[in-house]
Amino acid sequence: MPKIERKVLNRVEGEIHLKLLWDRDVIKDAYIQNLNFRGFEFILQNKPPLDALVITPRVCGICGHAHLIATVKALEDIYKKNGYNIQLSSKAKLIRKITHTVEIIQNHIRWFYLFVMPDFLKLEKDEKLKQLYVPIKGTKWRKGLNASNEALKIISILAGQWPHTSYAIPGGVMCDPVSTDIVECINLADFIIRFFEDEIVGTDINNYLSITSFEEFMDKIKEGDLRKFIDLSIKNRMEKIGRSYNRFITLDTVSPCIKEGVIKKRNCKLNINKIKEIETFSFLEKNKHNFSRKKYSWAKAVRYDGLPMETGPLARKITAENKLFSNLQATFGDSYMVRVWARIDEIGRMALTVKSWLLGINIKEPSYIKPVIDIDRLEGEGTGAVEAARGSLLHQVKIKDRKIKNYNIITPTTWNLGPRCEKYLSPAEKAIIGLDSSLKAEMVLRSFDVCSVCTTH
């Protein structure tokens, strides 16, 4: 009879319960249990449409800004479907993209230094490594936390606060930065670029971005925390584990390094109508509680054209046909090492993009252009898709009789860590099968950058 092991994982934006079934010292099955039901979709019902701009950012304390932008896009989509053109100035578009992308950057830095690197302390007995990455006291740990906080100052300057920002509304943004604000934001972007160069890759950013293969990386990059991570991964054979389906989805085009797309066996055109939620193993079925024996999570399974798909930075690299990560995937597959590397890589690329956007802002343009009609006078359905730190985020809203009739949220971690369906495990469950270590199972799970509160929203 298989041995059953139950683990509670913290440091995952809440808690995740992991049920492992062992047979002859190998994990034969895994159940990722999201048990912290929150009910935001029910809270939003019968609320005025604009209330969603304040409520949805509270789904998460790390990626709440992505929820705001998804909500705004969904409401603006309702305008469009009712025949009203929402005018957005270039300034408003840039500011939205800047603050949204900065949230991703700060998350990646914090996740890598506060969660990923400390995990290796459980595998290594290296006192020097401990001095660098041990939580609270480690010098690198503290530098990472400081860098993530510096990045957040850009959001504070432009959006007024973080987390739970609500400064974007249909028609633009509720801020009007002056020249000194933009200069300060550029200085902060430069700080993140320097941090990426000095601490993460140990070289000029353009030297790193020119790399197109693993061999070239190992030849050119001799220092920095990314190299240290790669060396530790190879030493502990993490480049060989954590593989899932090699199927990827990205729902939005954000910057030169993020393009919408679907990868099954080949690159396919995205069709949002092919996204379905399956309730077979979810406690939440037809908007009611169902605690039958086979159900084990408050999350639903998400499928694209009937298939489980991984979303997140690695998916973004593959759908954008990034040469380095296409080569890494060909060599190592969608493994733990490649998945984590993809997230770290985004820090530098996104910091450069944020700086270019800041330099492109014309402060004389309007921040907000009032829509010709109030949103609560409209009816219909709208969809907002964005790329959050952990992957693709989808908001769907239906308005009728001046109220929100229905609101549906599909988060990145629902894609990656939702339950199984009749045919397939979730991508993260699949990635754990076959491991011989519960610690490595935790690390593989964390490689998806878990957010349990988003998953159960």
Image (spheres, grey):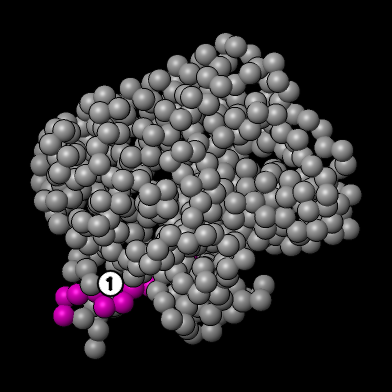
Q: Taking 395 as reference, is 334 left or right?
A: left
User: Hey, which residue is sitting farthest top in the picture?
Assistant: 180
**Image quadrant for the C terminus?**
bottom right
User: Hey, which residue is sitting farthest bottom in the picture?
Assistant: 1
Nearest the viewer among 439 and 168 is: 168
Residue 146 spot, x, y in % from top left: 37, 27
Taking the magenta stretch, the answer to whether it contains residue 105 is no
Residue 331 spot, x, y in % from top left: 21, 56
Q: Taking 427 as reference, is 340 left or right?
A: left
Numbered range of the magenta stretch: 24-34
Residue located 34% across and 64% down the image: 246
Q: Is residue 187 visible?
A: yes
Task: Write down the residue under mark 1.
Answer: 433
**Image quadrant for the N terminus?**
bottom left
Nearest the viewer among 383 and 264 is: 264
Predominant SS of the magenta segment: strand
SS type, badge 1: loop
Residue 30 is drawn in which quadrant?
A: bottom left
Q: Residues within 10 Å of mark 1 (few under 14, many from 20)?
A: many
Q: Is residue 48 visible?
A: no
Residue located 52% across and 13% down the image: 183
- Check the image and report above or below for 99 versus 330: above
- Check the image and report above or below for 248 versus 107: below
Residue 89 is drawn in which quadrant?
A: top right
| Tally of numbered tags | 1
